[in-house]
Amino acid sequence: MTLAHDDEGDGPAVLLLHSSVCDRRMWDPQWSALRNAGYRVLRCDFRGYGQTPMADRPYTDAEDVRDLLDTLRIDQVALVAASYGGKVGLEVAARWPDRVSTLALLCAGMPGHQPSAELRSFGASEDVLLEADDIAGAVELNVKTWLGPEADDAVRDRVRQMQRHAFEVQLAATEEFPAPERDEVDLGKISAPCLAVSGRYDLPDFRQIAARLPELLPNARHLELPWAGHLPSLERPAEVTALLTEFLAETAPPR
C-alpha cells in the first residue's frame, strides 16, 4: 500500500513525517517555503491518519516510508520529522542509512525509549477517555498536553481536527495487527547529520531524547527552544521554518 502523500517541487528530496497527534497537514506552514527554497518536498500520512486507511495486515511505519521512497524512485532523502514521526525517521535512518542524507528532528520519540511516569500517566488518561467513548475529552487532553503557550486558537483548532479524525479512523478499525518482529534498531548505524530540537515546555521524555542523541549519533547536535512545547513547527511556524531551511541548506543544499 502506498501512503497518501503530496509531492511537489524540484531539487533534493525532503520528506516530512508527522506527529501522532496530527497528520501531514501539520506541515502546511513549511510546505511552500521549503519548495520555494529549491527542494522536492514530500509529506505522507501514516496508516490510520489523514487520508491513509488503517492496515489490513502486519506492517511497520518505517517500512512503509521506505516503500514510499521506492515507489517514488527516490534514492536518498532529507527527513524532517516531528514527535512520533521522529521515532520513525530514526528507524529509517538506522535500517537504511544510505537512504537518508540528513535528519531534522522536532521533539522526536526514539526507538527503545522507556516512557517516564508522566508519559505513562498521559497514555492511561487517554485510554480511559477513549474507552468511555469520550473522543472530545481525549482530543482536548492531547491539545492541552502537546501544544505549548505560543500556540494560538487557530493552531489549537487545527490540531483538534487532525487528532479527532485520527481517533475516528483508528477506533472504527475492526482488527489490529501487531508489528512484525524485527531486529532492534541500532542508532549507531546512522551516518546522516542530525539536528535534534527540543522544547522547554515539552514532557521530559522528549527533552531527554533530544539531549541524548548527540551521545548516540556520530554527527548530531541538540538545540532547545526556550518558548516551545511539543509541536514547535505549529507554535511558531515562521521561526521553525527558518531554522529548518538553514539546517537543510548546510547539510542538503539545493542544487
Image (cartoon, rainbow, N blue to C red):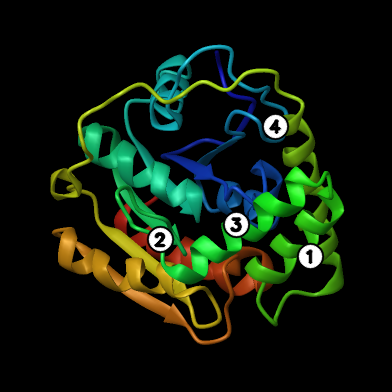
Q: Residues within 10 Å of mark 3 (few under 14, many from 20)?
A: few
Residue type highlighted by circle 3: Ala
Q: CA distance from mark 4 to mark 2?
A: 22 Å
Q: Residues within 10 Å of mark 2 (few under 14, many from 20)?
A: some
Residue drawn at the location 28% of the way across and 41% of the way down: 93
Circle 1/circle 2 CB separation < 8 Å: no
Residue type highlighted by circle 2: Pro
Q: CA distance from mark 3 to mark 1?
A: 25 Å
Circle 4/circle 2 CB separation < 8 Å: no
Against 5, residue 67 (above or below) is above
Could you say where residue 196 lies in the image, as x and y percent from the top left?
A: 36, 66
Residue drawn at the location 76% of the way across and 53% of the way down: 129
Q: Nearer the viewer, mark 1 or mark 4?
A: 4
Q: Nearer the viewer, mark 4 or mark 3?
A: 3
Mark closer to the chain start, 1 or 4: 1
Residue type highlighted by circle 1: Val
Looking at the rendered structure, the secondary structure element under dot 4 is helix
Is 75 or 63 nearer to us in this picture? 63
Quadrant location of the N terminus in the rendered image = top right
Question: Can residue 231 be seen in the rendering of this structure?
Answer: yes
Residue annotated with mark 3: 124
Q: Nearer the viewer, mark 1 or mark 2?
A: 2
Residue annotated with mark 1: 155
Mark closer to the chain start, 3 or 1: 3
Circle 1/circle 4 CB separation < 8 Å: no
Residue annotated with mark 4: 170
Q: Which mark is residue 115?
A: 2
Mark closer to the chain start, 1 or 2: 2
Q: Nearer the viewer, mark 3 or mark 1?
A: 3
Q: CA distance from mark 1 to mark 2?
A: 27 Å
Is 121 on the left-hand or right-hand side of 253?
right
